[in-house]
Amino acid sequence: MNHTFDATGIALDWTDLADDQCPDGPLRTGVARLASTTVGEVGVWEHPVGTSTDVEQDEVFVVLSGSGRVELPDGSTLTLRPGTVGVLAAGTPTTWIIDEPLRKVWLTASADSS
């Protein structure tokens, strides 16, 4: 299965985040799952301007557009801008503070790839 995708322009499915994930009011995020293999899953995700919280799974991502930051429980901050490559560990609580609508490509490992 060989494919290419335009990750900057692909249409996303938008859903409301749970109220407890949106400290400053309602937010919708968009996602497009692009591929799933025995190794992992890859997709595109977009977050509008605003703040949300999450508990992460193991993930590697590349920011395509937008800006913001991810605050981590140890007080450190990941700065997000086009070209940023981020690595998040499973179980990490995060706060996403987005200043410009942020779009990223993400890769997660499959549960059966370990």
Image: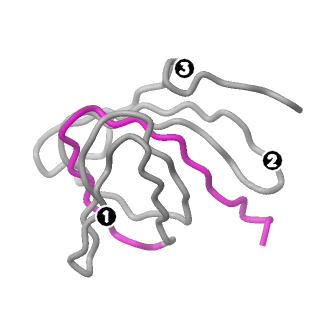
- 12 w.r.t. 38: above or below: above
Residue sticking out furthest to the bottom: 74
- The quarter in which the N terminus is drawn is top right
**Circle 1 SS class:** strand
Highlighted range, magenta: 91-114
Which residue is pictured at 42% across the width and 50% down the height? Answer: 84
Report if residue 109 lies within the magenta region: yes
* Residue 86 numbered mark, or none: none
Task: Using the rendered view, name the quadrant where residue 49 is placed.
Answer: top left
First in sequence: mark 2 vs mark 1: 2
**Circle 3 SS class:** loop
Q: Mark 3 points at which residue?
A: 10
Report if residue 10 lies within the magenta region: no
Residue 92 percent across, percent down from the top left: 40, 72
State how far apart marks 1 and 3 are (Cα): 26 Å
Q: Name the residue under label 2.
A: 37
